Amino acid sequence: MATALEIGREELRQKLESGSEFVLVDALPPIAFAASRLPGAINIPPESVDGTADVRIPDREAEVVVYCANPDCESSVEVAARLVELGYRNVRHYSGGKEDWRDAGLPLEGGRV
Amino acid sequence: MHAHYVDGVTIRPLRNGDTQTVAAVFERLGAGSREKRFCGAKPRLPDAELAALARVDGDRHVLVAYADGDPEPVGIARLVRDGAAAEIAFEVVDEHQGNGIGSVLAEELAAVARAAGIRELRATVCGDNPPVVSLLRKVASSLHVSWRGREREFVLALDR
């Protein structure tokens, strides 16, 4: 399986705050994405990558950061690996995910709950 | 939360609109299983109902189970959000009942529910259905039951 480089919470936070151009991908199921997500994230669960990546992330050179629930969550690993296989050249993985982000007191968007 | 393999059972999320898989499981349910699942006789699934059961979105999540050695789907579990709670329902095809498939589905569904911030699950059980009651008891940290005619409504608190 292709792998993506890791990105830490602090670097991701700085990228979001500075308004850097990158695509933040939440790999959780739509029901979890609707409940809460990192600011600005789009939702691409593993089963949707092949059908939607071309449309949602047309630029293969774009920086993409993928996350899911926590370090035990495999969906973000699968999505990141599949994106690399599809030719995306700058894919990174935030393994801490939503749990690490929330535990650090950082804001989430959403609120279906 | 993509495909998981546990004790001979592969669980994967249903793709939004995959009516074929929903229909395939329904076709393999015997009359008794259909009656328990839908709380009444259910000889066929109307198209509109089939489409609703195959819907996946911000409020609905569906898991499909496959058993080793069987190319067709053998079970489905569904979660429909209602605020911080969600309604859950399960179906396992007759020939695979009693093999723990419901338990695997329930554990996976509870994990999705927790990730979605859901704190409480509700399940309607029609008539006598000891396997489903036993399965619900395994998932919840606490469980409340109320009767509505022949139906029982179970309210399950989810641990975080």
Image (cartoon, grey):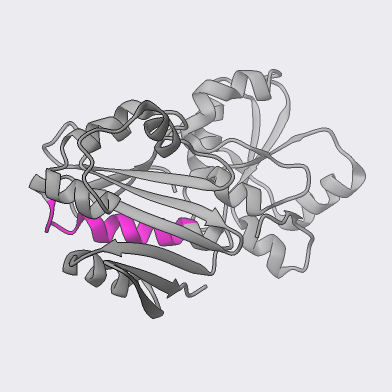
Q: Position of residue A89 (x, y in %)?
A: 64, 25
Please state if A63 lies on the left or on the right of B137 as rendered. Answer: right
Q: Is residue B1 above or below residue B148?
A: above
Q: Position of residue B5 (x, y in %)?
A: 28, 48
Q: Give the quadrant of residue B27.
A: top left
Pick whichever, B138 or A108, lies toward us: B138
- A36 vs A65, nearest the viewer: A36
Q: Say which residue appears at 45% left-offset and 66% top-offset.
A: B121
Q: Is residue B110 magenta?
A: yes
Q: Is residue B119 left or right of residue B67?
A: right
Report x, y in % for residue B100. Answer: 18, 59
Q: Residue furthest front?
A: B149
Q: At x 78% / y 62%, what residue is drawn?
A: A106
The magenta span reads B97-112
Residue A113 higher or lower than A21, as above or below: below
> Chief secondary structure of the magenta span?
helix
Q: Nearer the viewer, residue B42 or B122?
A: B42
Q: Is residue A3 visible?
A: no
Q: Residue at x 45, y 28 (%)?
A: B17
**In the image, A110: left or right of B64?**
right
Residue that extends furthest to the left in the rendered view of this protein: B95
Residue B26: within the magenta?
no
